[in-house]
């Protein structure tokens, strides 16, 4: 993964590109959701939001919508997957220099459907743990019917790149005399008060202490 | 926009589909960013995160990466655009019934490049205002060089659909006796303490009072 390919090389703002395995993994692990793009049978682009997880050097996705297309495709479905975390709004002294601080990953690859029962169970567990660590030990694992209803796709993380912007606005020299306030408004995903379903119970630690990286509650 | 087309009709969980103009507009307006998918010249899918805005019934995008492909495409570039807001983590009593509460929009259409100077200025203003309402009056509008460096795409909102999940987990009857805590963990985008660039100044209202819909700070 360390060497960019022609399509993963970051062309616009190349200084924002990162190809290290650890950087790509960390962004995929932190992002709650991703967007899966593929080309439909009629040749037009499709994109859907979906939940993902990572195990070692493989990205796994729920693939219900894409699965119809995948089954019509010999040898797997070519996909592009993006996961993006917004870290801040960058307020510059000119409209054009406004930006966002973000960390994003794009993965290109050929998706295969996950059919091996052991791998499927590991993916099911990992997807729940990706969203709420510690959750699977408290809840029931999939029964055969649920398992049959779930499509899982695997995409090797062989062709992936990260793009990161951080730090203050970059303004033109001539704009620095502007009276405008400039700087960064950080944004994080905050967790609100849990809304219980059914009887009120003591919150277990994995719910009561839940917060996103850098997030409040 | 009220009648779904074959590709905008929500097939999985059709009860979550919405095709009303107002619903689609509201989600696009609230979502900070979107993901733009298109088919590259070699026929493979591409997806990039980007900032958007909406004016009336048109979606506008920054399109730097897609613009190379677009220029090679006669009559505009076919795109799929998704904007997704995560509202909560849905914690069920079984792994398979875990879900997320979200509001998402997918738009299909042919993008044209925005070249008219008046339209370009309106889009530049609208993109900044989309992210930080009230910001443009305090900051400098684009000069001719900046304007030339910016690619803008317009996509008509003629073929768009929303998909929404809200409310508590839906568990199997047999799981209701589970001792697991079940319910929803709401998530919102919280604004942190503004980080000024340069001299410390009084925060103007559009910065000091900034918060996302439903968000804290």
Image: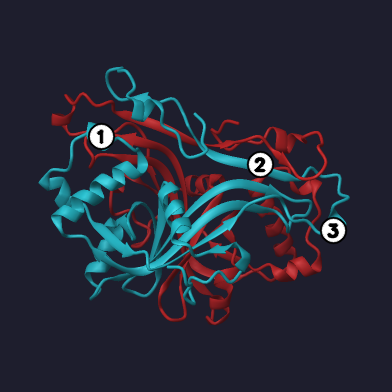
Chain colours: A red, B cyan
Labelled pair 1, 2 in contact (Cβ < 8 Å): no
> Depth-wise, is mark 3 or mark 1 nearer the camera?
3
Residue hosting label 1: A170
- Which residue is depicted at the point 54% across and 82% down? A72
Q: Nearer the viewer, residue B27 or A76?
A: B27
- Which residue is depicted at the point 67% across and 50% down? B167
Can you see residue B39?
no
Secondary structure of the residue carrying tag 2 is strand
**Quarter occupied by the C terminus of chain A:** top right
Instruction: Name the side, left or right, on which A104 lies relative to A172.
Output: right
Mark 3 on the same chain as mark 1: no
Labelled pair 3, 2 in contact (Cβ < 8 Å): no
Residue hosting label 3: B173
Q: Position of residue A35 (x, y in %)?
A: 49, 58
Q: Nearer the viewer, residue B78 or B43?
A: B78
| Label 1 environment density (alpha carbons within 10 Å; few <14, some 14–19, many ≥20) | some
Labelled pair 3, 1 in contact (Cβ < 8 Å): no
Secondary structure of the residue carrying tag 1 is loop
> Depth-wise, is mark 1 or mark 2 nearer the camera?
2
Q: Position of residue B11 (x, y in %)?
A: 58, 72
Subunit under mark 3: B
Q: Nearer the viewer, residue A166 or B150?
A: B150
Instruction: Name the side, left or right, on which B8 lies relative to A212.
Output: left
Q: In which quadrant of the rendered view does residue B200 lie?
A: top left
Q: In which quadrant of the rendered view does residue B42 lie?
A: bottom left
Residue hosting label 2: B185
Q: Nearer the viewer, residue A36 or A76?
A: A36
Name the residue at the left extreme: B144
- Which residue is depicted at the point 35% across and 52% down? B52
């Amino acid at each position: 993964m360390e060497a960019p390919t022609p399509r993963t090389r970051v062309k616009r703002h190349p200084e924002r590109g990162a190809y290290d395995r650890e950087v790509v993994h960390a962004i995929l692990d932190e992002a709650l959701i991703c967007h899966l793009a593929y080309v439909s049978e009629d040749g037009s682009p499709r994109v859907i939001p979906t939940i993902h997880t990572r195990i070692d050097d493989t990205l796994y996705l729920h693939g219900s919508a894409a699965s119809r297309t995948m089954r019509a495709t010999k040898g797997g479905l070519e996909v592009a997957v993006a996961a993006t975390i917004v870290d801040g709004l960058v307020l510059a002294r000119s409209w054009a220099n406004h930006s966002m601080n973000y960390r994003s990953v794009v993965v290109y690859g050929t998706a295969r459907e996950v059919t091996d029962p052991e791998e499927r169970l590991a993916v099911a567990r990992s997807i729940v743990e990706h969203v709420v660590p510690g959750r699977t030990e408290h809840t029931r694992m999939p029964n055969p019917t649920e398992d049959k209803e779930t499509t899982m796709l695997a995409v090797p993380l062989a062709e992936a790149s990260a793009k990161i912007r951080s730090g203050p606005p970059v303004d033109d020299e001539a704009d620095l005399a502007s009276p405008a306030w400039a700087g960064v408004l950080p944004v994080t995903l905050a967790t609100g008060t849990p809304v219980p379903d059914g009887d009120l119970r003591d919150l277990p630690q994995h719910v009561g202490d839940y917060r996103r990286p850098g997030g409040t509650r």
